[in-house]
Protein backbone atom coordinates (compact mmCIF):
# COMPACT_ATOMS: atom_id res chain seq x y z
CA UNK A 1 0.00 0.00 0.00
CA UNK A 2 1.24 3.49 -0.82
CA UNK A 3 2.34 5.65 2.06
CA UNK A 4 0.46 8.79 2.99
CA UNK A 5 2.17 12.07 2.15
CA UNK A 6 4.24 13.24 5.08
CA UNK A 7 4.60 9.72 6.47
CA UNK A 8 7.80 9.14 8.39
CA UNK A 9 8.39 5.76 10.05
CA UNK A 10 9.14 5.97 13.73
CA UNK A 11 11.82 3.89 15.39
CA UNK A 12 11.12 0.20 15.12
CA UNK A 13 10.52 -1.45 18.45
CA UNK A 14 9.45 -4.73 19.92
CA UNK A 15 6.10 -3.20 20.83
CA UNK A 16 5.68 -5.12 24.10
CA UNK A 17 6.20 -8.46 22.38
CA UNK A 18 4.24 -7.59 19.26
CA UNK A 19 7.15 -8.78 17.10
CA UNK A 20 5.55 -12.23 17.28
CA UNK A 21 2.76 -11.08 14.96
CA UNK A 22 3.52 -11.31 11.26
CA UNK A 23 1.46 -8.25 10.31
CA UNK A 24 -0.74 -5.82 12.20
CA UNK A 25 -3.17 -3.32 10.70
CA UNK A 26 -5.70 -0.93 12.16
CA UNK A 27 -8.52 0.65 10.14
CA UNK A 28 -10.39 3.60 11.56
CA UNK A 29 -14.16 3.30 11.10
CA UNK A 30 -15.85 4.98 8.15
CA UNK A 31 -17.39 8.42 8.39
CA UNK A 32 -20.15 8.43 11.00
CA UNK A 33 -23.20 10.63 11.42
CA UNK A 34 -21.54 12.05 14.54
CA UNK A 35 -18.46 13.02 12.50
CA UNK A 36 -20.74 14.98 10.17
CA UNK A 37 -22.65 16.59 13.07
CA UNK A 38 -19.43 17.53 14.87
CA UNK A 39 -18.01 19.24 11.79
CA UNK A 40 -21.26 21.16 11.32
CA UNK A 41 -21.34 22.29 14.96
CA UNK A 42 -17.68 23.28 15.06
CA UNK A 43 -18.00 25.27 11.82
CA UNK A 44 -21.08 27.08 13.18
CA UNK A 45 -19.38 27.96 16.46
CA UNK A 46 -21.97 25.99 18.44
CA UNK A 47 -21.33 24.68 21.93
CA UNK A 48 -23.11 21.34 21.50
CA UNK A 49 -23.01 18.70 18.79
CA UNK A 50 -26.48 17.60 17.72
CA UNK A 51 -26.33 13.88 18.43
CA UNK A 52 -29.24 11.46 18.11
CA UNK A 53 -27.50 8.33 19.42
CA UNK A 54 -25.31 7.30 22.31
CA UNK A 55 -21.62 7.10 21.41
CA UNK A 56 -21.77 3.32 21.20
CA UNK A 57 -24.76 3.40 18.81
CA UNK A 58 -23.63 6.09 16.32
CA UNK A 59 -24.12 4.70 12.78
CA UNK A 60 -22.10 5.27 9.64
CA UNK A 61 -23.13 7.96 7.19
CA UNK A 62 -23.81 6.98 3.58
CA UNK A 63 -20.26 8.12 2.76
CA UNK A 64 -18.93 5.99 5.61
CA UNK A 65 -20.69 2.90 4.32
CA UNK A 66 -19.17 3.38 0.87
CA UNK A 67 -15.73 3.91 2.43
CA UNK A 68 -16.14 0.59 4.27
CA UNK A 69 -17.16 -1.21 1.08
CA UNK A 70 -14.14 0.28 -0.71
CA UNK A 71 -11.92 -1.00 2.09
CA UNK A 72 -13.47 -4.42 1.50
CA UNK A 73 -12.62 -4.25 -2.20
CA UNK A 74 -9.03 -3.43 -1.24
CA UNK A 75 -8.90 -6.42 1.11
CA UNK A 76 -10.38 -8.71 -1.53
CA UNK A 77 -7.65 -7.63 -3.94
CA UNK A 78 -4.83 -8.67 -1.63
CA UNK A 79 -3.05 -11.94 -2.46
CA UNK A 80 -4.29 -14.75 -0.22
CA UNK A 81 -0.94 -14.94 1.57
CA UNK A 82 -1.26 -11.27 2.59
CA UNK A 83 -4.84 -11.27 3.83
CA UNK A 84 -5.63 -11.09 7.54
CA UNK A 85 -6.00 -14.32 9.49
CA UNK A 86 -8.17 -12.60 12.08
CA UNK A 87 -10.09 -9.34 12.50
CA UNK A 88 -10.92 -7.76 15.86
CA UNK A 89 -13.36 -4.87 16.15
CA UNK A 90 -14.50 -2.28 18.68
CA UNK A 91 -18.04 -3.07 19.88
CA UNK A 92 -19.21 0.43 18.85
CA UNK A 93 -21.70 0.30 15.99
CA UNK A 94 -19.74 2.51 13.57
CA UNK A 95 -16.72 0.22 13.87
CA UNK A 96 -18.75 -3.00 13.73
CA UNK A 97 -20.58 -1.86 10.61
CA UNK A 98 -17.29 -0.86 8.97
CA UNK A 99 -15.83 -4.29 9.71
CA UNK A 100 -18.91 -6.16 8.52
CA UNK A 101 -19.01 -4.30 5.22
CA UNK A 102 -15.26 -4.59 4.69
CA UNK A 103 -15.22 -8.32 5.40
CA UNK A 104 -18.32 -9.23 3.37
CA UNK A 105 -17.59 -12.23 1.16
CA UNK A 106 -14.42 -13.20 3.02
CA UNK A 107 -13.80 -16.05 5.45
CA UNK A 108 -11.82 -13.83 7.83
CA UNK A 109 -13.11 -14.50 11.36
CA UNK A 110 -14.32 -11.39 13.21
CA UNK A 111 -14.57 -10.94 16.94
CA UNK A 112 -15.49 -7.98 19.12
CA UNK A 113 -13.32 -6.70 21.94
CA UNK A 114 -14.38 -3.86 24.24
CA UNK A 115 -10.74 -2.85 24.70
CA UNK A 116 -10.91 -1.37 21.18
CA UNK A 117 -13.79 0.97 22.08
CA UNK A 118 -13.40 4.71 21.58
CA UNK A 119 -12.03 6.93 24.33
CA UNK A 120 -14.69 8.00 26.84
CA UNK A 121 -14.80 11.80 27.15
CA UNK A 122 -17.04 11.83 30.22
CA UNK A 123 -18.71 15.19 30.89
CA UNK A 124 -17.09 16.66 27.75
CA UNK A 125 -18.89 14.24 25.45
CA UNK A 126 -21.08 15.97 22.89
CA UNK A 127 -19.41 19.37 23.22
CA UNK A 128 -17.36 21.26 20.67
CA UNK A 129 -14.02 22.77 21.63
CA UNK A 130 -15.83 26.09 22.06
CA UNK A 131 -18.44 24.42 24.25
CA UNK A 132 -15.78 22.91 26.51
CA UNK A 133 -14.17 26.32 27.03
CA UNK A 134 -17.53 27.98 27.70
CA UNK A 135 -18.98 25.37 30.06
CA UNK A 136 -15.94 23.77 31.62
CA UNK A 137 -13.32 26.49 31.74
CA UNK A 138 -11.73 24.97 34.83
CA UNK A 139 -11.39 21.63 33.07
CA UNK A 140 -9.86 23.29 30.02
CA UNK A 141 -7.28 24.95 32.27
CA UNK A 142 -6.60 21.66 34.08
CA UNK A 143 -6.07 19.92 30.77
CA UNK A 144 -3.61 22.62 29.71
CA UNK A 145 -1.74 22.13 32.97
CA UNK A 146 -1.64 18.31 32.92
CA UNK A 147 -1.18 17.90 29.17
CA UNK A 148 -3.28 15.94 26.70
CA UNK A 149 -1.63 12.60 27.44
CA UNK A 150 -2.45 12.45 31.16
CA UNK A 151 -5.59 14.57 31.42
CA UNK A 152 -8.71 12.59 32.40
CA UNK A 153 -12.03 14.43 32.04
CA UNK A 154 -14.52 13.82 34.86
CA UNK A 155 -16.23 10.51 34.17
CA UNK A 156 -13.96 9.81 31.21
CA UNK A 157 -10.57 8.39 30.24
CA UNK A 158 -7.10 9.77 29.71
CA UNK A 159 -4.94 8.71 26.78
CA UNK A 160 -2.94 6.63 29.26
CA UNK A 161 -6.11 4.80 30.32
CA UNK A 162 -6.76 3.82 26.71
CA UNK A 163 -3.12 2.83 26.25
CA UNK A 164 -3.37 0.42 29.20
CA UNK A 165 -6.35 -1.47 27.79
CA UNK A 166 -4.82 -1.47 24.32
CA UNK A 167 -1.53 -2.80 25.69
CA UNK A 168 -3.43 -5.68 27.31
CA UNK A 169 -5.15 -6.52 24.03
CA UNK A 170 -1.86 -6.52 22.16
CA UNK A 171 -0.37 -8.86 24.72
CA UNK A 172 -3.22 -11.30 24.23
CA UNK A 173 -2.91 -11.14 20.45
CA UNK A 174 0.82 -11.78 20.67
CA UNK A 175 0.30 -14.79 22.88
CA UNK A 176 -2.63 -16.34 21.00
CA UNK A 177 -1.86 -15.43 17.37
CA UNK A 178 1.92 -15.54 17.04
CA UNK A 179 3.03 -15.42 13.42
CA UNK A 180 -0.42 -14.43 12.15
CA UNK A 181 -1.77 -11.36 10.35
CA UNK A 182 -4.25 -9.40 12.50
CA UNK A 183 -6.56 -6.60 11.37
CA UNK A 184 -8.13 -4.24 13.91
CA UNK A 185 -11.11 -1.94 13.36
CA UNK A 186 -11.30 0.96 15.77
CA UNK A 187 -11.09 4.68 16.39
CA UNK A 188 -8.70 7.55 15.79
CA UNK A 189 -7.07 7.68 19.23
CA UNK A 190 -6.29 3.96 18.97
CA UNK A 191 -4.36 4.51 15.74
CA UNK A 192 -2.08 7.01 17.46
CA UNK A 193 -1.71 4.83 20.54
CA UNK A 194 -0.81 1.74 18.52
CA UNK A 195 2.06 3.69 17.04
CA UNK A 196 3.02 4.70 20.58
CA UNK A 197 3.00 1.10 21.78
CA UNK A 198 4.33 -0.81 18.79
CA UNK A 199 7.06 1.68 17.88
CA UNK A 200 7.87 2.57 21.50
CA UNK A 201 7.38 6.28 20.94
CA UNK A 202 7.83 8.80 23.73
CA UNK A 203 4.97 10.95 24.96
CA UNK A 204 6.49 13.93 23.13
CA UNK A 205 6.70 11.98 19.85
CA UNK A 206 3.10 10.79 20.21
CA UNK A 207 1.74 14.27 20.94
CA UNK A 208 3.69 15.66 17.97
CA UNK A 209 1.92 13.11 15.76
CA UNK A 210 -1.49 14.22 17.06
CA UNK A 211 -0.67 17.83 16.23
CA UNK A 212 0.45 17.02 12.68
CA UNK A 213 -2.14 14.47 11.64
CA UNK A 214 -5.87 13.85 11.64
CA UNK A 215 -6.69 10.15 11.31
CA UNK A 216 -8.89 9.78 8.25
CA UNK A 217 -12.02 7.66 8.13
CA UNK A 218 -11.24 4.15 6.82
CA UNK A 219 -7.53 4.95 6.72
CA UNK A 220 -5.12 2.03 7.08
CA UNK A 221 -2.10 1.99 9.37
CA UNK A 222 0.09 -1.10 9.40
CA UNK A 223 3.25 -2.81 10.56
CA UNK A 224 5.06 -5.90 9.24
CA UNK A 225 7.67 -8.08 10.88
CA UNK A 226 11.19 -7.59 9.54
CA UNK A 227 13.87 -10.26 9.23
CA UNK A 228 14.59 -10.01 12.94
CA UNK A 229 10.92 -10.49 13.81
CA UNK A 230 10.37 -6.88 14.85
CA UNK A 231 7.24 -5.06 13.75
CA UNK A 232 8.17 -2.05 11.65
CA UNK A 233 5.74 0.53 10.21
CA UNK A 234 4.90 0.32 6.52
CA UNK A 235 1.82 2.57 6.24
CA UNK A 236 0.22 5.33 8.28
CA UNK A 237 -3.16 7.01 7.88
CA UNK A 238 -3.31 5.77 4.30
CA UNK A 239 -6.45 6.39 2.23
CA UNK A 240 -4.99 5.56 -1.17
CA UNK A 241 -7.24 2.50 -1.38
CA UNK A 242 -10.35 4.68 -1.10
CA UNK A 243 -9.35 6.72 -4.12
CA UNK A 244 -8.33 3.61 -6.03
CA UNK A 245 -11.71 2.02 -5.32
CA UNK A 246 -13.66 5.16 -6.24
CA UNK A 247 -14.84 6.07 -2.72
CA UNK A 248 -14.94 9.64 -1.46
CA UNK A 249 -12.57 10.36 1.42
CA UNK A 250 -14.01 12.42 4.24
CA UNK A 251 -13.45 16.06 3.31
CA UNK A 252 -13.65 17.68 6.72
CA UNK A 253 -11.02 17.25 9.39
CA UNK A 254 -12.17 15.48 12.52
CA UNK A 255 -13.14 17.91 15.28
CA UNK A 256 -12.47 16.98 18.87
CA UNK A 257 -14.52 17.70 21.96
CA UNK A 258 -11.42 18.66 23.90
CA UNK A 259 -9.85 22.12 23.57
CA UNK A 260 -6.74 22.06 21.42
Image (spheres, helix red, strand yellow):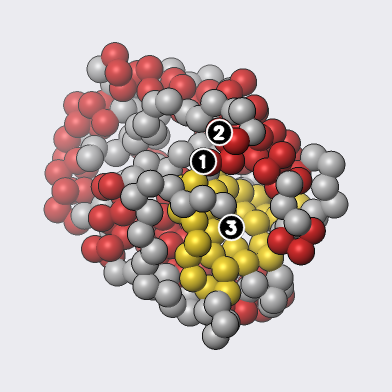
Quarter of the picture containing the C terminus is: top left
Quadrant housing residue 126 = top left
Instruction: Estimate how packed mark 1 is, as few (under 14), some (14 to 19) or many (20 or more) residues with alpha carbons within 10 Å.
Output: many
Q: Earlier in the sequence, mark 3 or mark 2?
A: 3
Q: Position of residue 61 (x, y in %)?
A: 58, 23
- Between the residue at mark 1 and the residue at mark 3, the CA separation in whole angstroms equals 13 Å
Using the numbered discs, state the Cα–Cα distance from disc 3 to disc 2 in whole angstroms: 19 Å
Residue position for label 2: 243
Camera-nearest residue between 230 and 243: 243
Q: Residue at x 58, y 57 (%)?
A: 25
**Which mark identifies residue 164?**
none
Residue marked by disc 1: 239
User: What kind of element bears circle 2?
Assistant: helix
Q: Position of residue 34 (x, y in %)?
A: 49, 26
Position of 132 relative to 149 (above/below): above
From the viewer's perspective, tell me whether residue 84 is left or right of residue 35.
right
Pointer 2 with pointer 1, Cβ within 8 A: yes
Residue that mark 3 sits on? 25
Please state which of the two labelled residues, at mark 2 or mark 1, is closer to the viewer.
2
Residue 48 % position (x, y):
34, 21
Image check: 192 left or right of 2?
left
Q: Do labels 3 and 2 touch, CB within 8 Å?
A: no
Q: Earlier in the sequence, mark 1 or mark 3?
A: 3
Identify the element where label 3 is drawn: strand
Q: CA distance from mark 2 to mark 1?
A: 7 Å
Evaluate whether residue 86 shows in this view.
Answer: no
In percent of width and height, residue 250 lies at 47, 28
Compared with 20, 154 (above or below) is: above
| Mark 3 or 2: the one toward you | 2
One can see residue 207 in this view = yes
User: Which residue is rendered at x = 50% and y = 62% of the image?
Assistant: 234
Q: Nearer the viewer, residue 122 or 232?
A: 232
Amino acid sequence: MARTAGYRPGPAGTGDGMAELSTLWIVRHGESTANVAATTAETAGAEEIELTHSDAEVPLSATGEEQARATGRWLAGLPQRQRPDLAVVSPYLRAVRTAELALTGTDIPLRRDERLRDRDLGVLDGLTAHGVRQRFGTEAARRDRLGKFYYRPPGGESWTDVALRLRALLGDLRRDHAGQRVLLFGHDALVFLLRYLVEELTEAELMALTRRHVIANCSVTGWSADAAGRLTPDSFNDIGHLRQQGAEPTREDEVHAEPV
